[in-house]
Image (cartoon, rainbow, N blue to C red):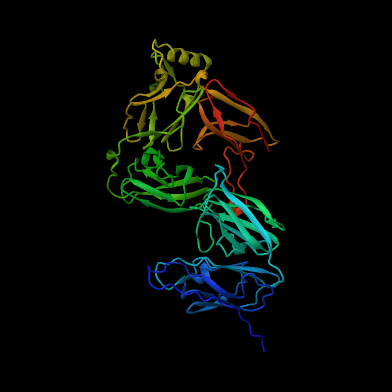
Amino acid sequence: MLPFLFASCVTEQAPEGGPPDETPPKLVCSFPENGALNFKGNKIRLTFNKEIKVEGIYTNLLIMPKLDALKDKQPYSYTVNGKTLEIKFAIPLKEHTTYSMHFNNAVKDTHEGTKPTGAVLTFSTDSFIDAITAKGETKELLTNRPVGNVSVYLYSSERDPKEWQEKGGIPDYYTTTDKEGNFTMDHIRLGTYYIRATTGKSNKYEIDYEKDQYGFFKDPIHLNDFQSAILIPLISADVRDFTLLRSAPQKGIYEVVFNKPIIKYQLIPLEAIGAKGKPQIHSLLSDKSPRTIFIYNTFGLLEGEQLEVKLIAEDAYHTVLEKHLPIRFKEGKEDIEKTRLSHSVLTRPFPSILPSFTEVITFNKPIQETNQDLIYFELANEKKIPLKEEALAWNSDKTKLTIKKVFKQEEIAALSRAAQGEKDYDKTKKTVVLHMETGACIAFDKEKNKKIDIVYPFRNEEETGTISGNIDTAVEHFIIELLNDKDVIVDTVRNTKNYCFTMVPPGTYGIRILVLNEGEEVWSPGNIRKNIEPNPVIFYEKELAVVEKWDVTGIDFKF
């Protein structure tokens, strides 16, 4: 005969009268009791101070560490009787293990609109409660700013990673950070664990690579003692498989849609059209819709006709997709005439003239012809500085024009003299204008650009400061970025161990260093699906204040 086991309960009486009771159910007694040792039973009994109901218990009730899974069967069953919830385990609990049951949203009272209980029950099948505690924080890797309300998961290294890497899986231990990104996990069993963190709230503990910020370590962490400084860096990186979702004819255009943004592409005609040979293909990858390529019917295909084209597209993670597409169009002319040729300019924190100048102008239609003689700089004294052919570069679909100009010393001197030649000195008059005359750019449909004038203030040394320092590292490839107080990049220096940012306007700044892989021009966010961590990012921990005619020196790094 089994001994009679019981736990005493305190009866709480609800007050009579007054407003409706909206407080969550309170756990008043349990078997085993909270903190119990040497528990060998297969049933848990919990009594609350009011009648209860359960919602989504197999999703919302989190038992840590994870219970052993059963094929086609839940690891426990449950019954509710008034104020009492009873849970019966399908298989014995593990020996020498501390269990914590987090009820989260699983238990509510029977009235609509009341909050769920936040009860936690901890007990052990051994003679002690596991004492390992893990503390840490979550931060954005590229800003070093804390991120709150992040789910943090621990998975025992003894488990097969295939259980949880792709489709999610119940973690052995789980918590959520506070608003400042801090987290604590108690009663962890000694061992090694893989760690994952996500801003997503999936009940299946999955990471949505398209929408979530997430973080991970490629190797398991050792929790053999108290850990108080686990820093989990979070990134946004859509590492889903790169796929073509659909391609379909429209009136006057052919639409090609991918599952995520593409950074570059090629369209290669594979056949000729009549005696004209292989046609030139005009297409558009819009900044507003970076997943979609629009191909225009500029070669006169009629409905029912088609042109075989080879498409080569690449996403941000250098995954290349090749497809053969039969380009065709629906009858009727696409309303191109109603879309007038327009442009936009890349937003910059300090748009101004520097010795090394870059500007990016984006058009809403592919450009077929460019007249470089109609693109030039003009000083305040009406002196013109022309642009050479190599200063102009187009992207693959000829919608984005990059203008690069390295001003010579004599040109800088001329700019300075022109800016300071006014009798009534006024900083607002110290400007240089980039002109694009009408007809400088002609779209594929023969529409000419309207005149574009972009005014830049002239930045000189007397109104600015410098920031300089040394990099002590064996790493050969890196980017040093100067950031303003909104984490916007102001200036960059590459692979220079004795660096200096010159002509920096007064303000508050930060510096970060992006470590690059050999042979790559851009920083890599890694690939969680391939267990490749992001490349390191190093921050200077203090803010840097720049004033006019002041050199900020000694901003050194070692890594």
Residue 257 percent across, percent down from the top left? 42, 50
Q: Nearer the viewer, residue 60 or 100?
A: 100
Is residue 75 rendered to the left or right of residue 193?
left
- In the displayed structure, 333 sits above or below 399; it is below
Is residue 159 rendered to the left or right of residue 349?
right
- In the displayed structure, 119 sits above or below 151; it is below
Can residue 133 be seen here? The reply is yes
For the point 38% across and 72% down, which residue is it?
17
Residue 124 percent across, percent down from the top left? 67, 71
The quadrant the N terminus occupies is bottom right
- In the displayed structure, 411 sits above or below 213; it is above
Is residue 112 rendered to the left or right of residue 103?
left
Which corner quadrant of the image does residue 273 belong to?
top left
Residue 222 percent across, percent down from the top left? 70, 56
The quadrant the C terminus occupies is top right
Residue 488 percent across, percent down from the top left? 50, 36
Q: Nearer the viewer, residue 449 or 107?
A: 107
For the point 58% across and 75% down, which residue is it?
30
